[in-house]
Image: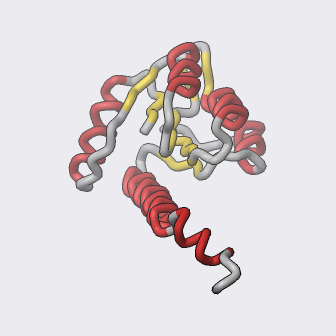
Amino acid sequence: MLLLEDNLLDVELFENWLEDEGLSLELTNVRSKDQFEAAILEGNWDLIVSDRGLPNYDGLSALQFKSRICPNVAFFFFSGAEAEGDFAESCHGSAATAYILKSEPKRLLAAIRAVLADLESIEDSLRGSSPDSCASALSPDS
């Protein structure tokens, strides 16, 4: 999981919440535009959690960059501020999976569990289909 968060106290809280929930995820924290964009280009992420505002960067720009590179990866805004005005409007029609307040970490953890369950289901489906099963379905003797 990729976490775009500049506040190290929030990163520590986030790690503790994951641990308390029994979610053993590899968490990579980035704190700037350059770090985020490099991580997106280098990594294979299951999901991304982003603060709304950082010094010299913002979550909406991060979402737009992520959407160009890896559009199918879940993206959650996790912010201490309510989404208001133009930002709320931008989020409404965006590719963000959800906007969750930092005062509601249980909602984010539930959403993370749902994404992980979906990914596991997809992986199970892919493992269940082997080349042999496809070949037998197409053979004239079937």
Camera-side residue of 137 and 68: 137
Whole-percent x, y for residue 131 in the image: 55, 63
Residue at image position (49%, 38%) is 45
Residue at image position (52%, 24%) is 42
Camera-side residue of 56 and 136: 136
Residue at image position (56%, 13%) is 34
Please give left or right for residue 71 compared with residue 8 in the image.
right
Colour mapping? secondary structure
Position of the N terminus by quadrant: top left
Please give left or right for residue 100 compared with residue 11 in the image.
right
Q: Tell which residue pokes out farthest to the bottom in this image.
A: 142
Camera-side residue of 126 and 96: 126
Position of the C terminus by quadrant: bottom right
Q: How many marks?
A: 0
Whole-percent x, y for residue 139 in the image: 66, 76
Residue at image position (22%, 51%) is 20
Looking at the image, residue 12 lies above or below residue 139: above
Where residue 83 sits, quadrant-wise, is top right
Whole-percent x, y for residue 113 in the image: 40, 59
Looking at the image, residue 93 lies above or below residue 8: below
Q: Is residue 107 something that shows in the picture?
A: no
Please give left or right for residue 121 compared with residue 62 in the image.
left
Q: Is residue 109 something that shows in the picture?
A: yes
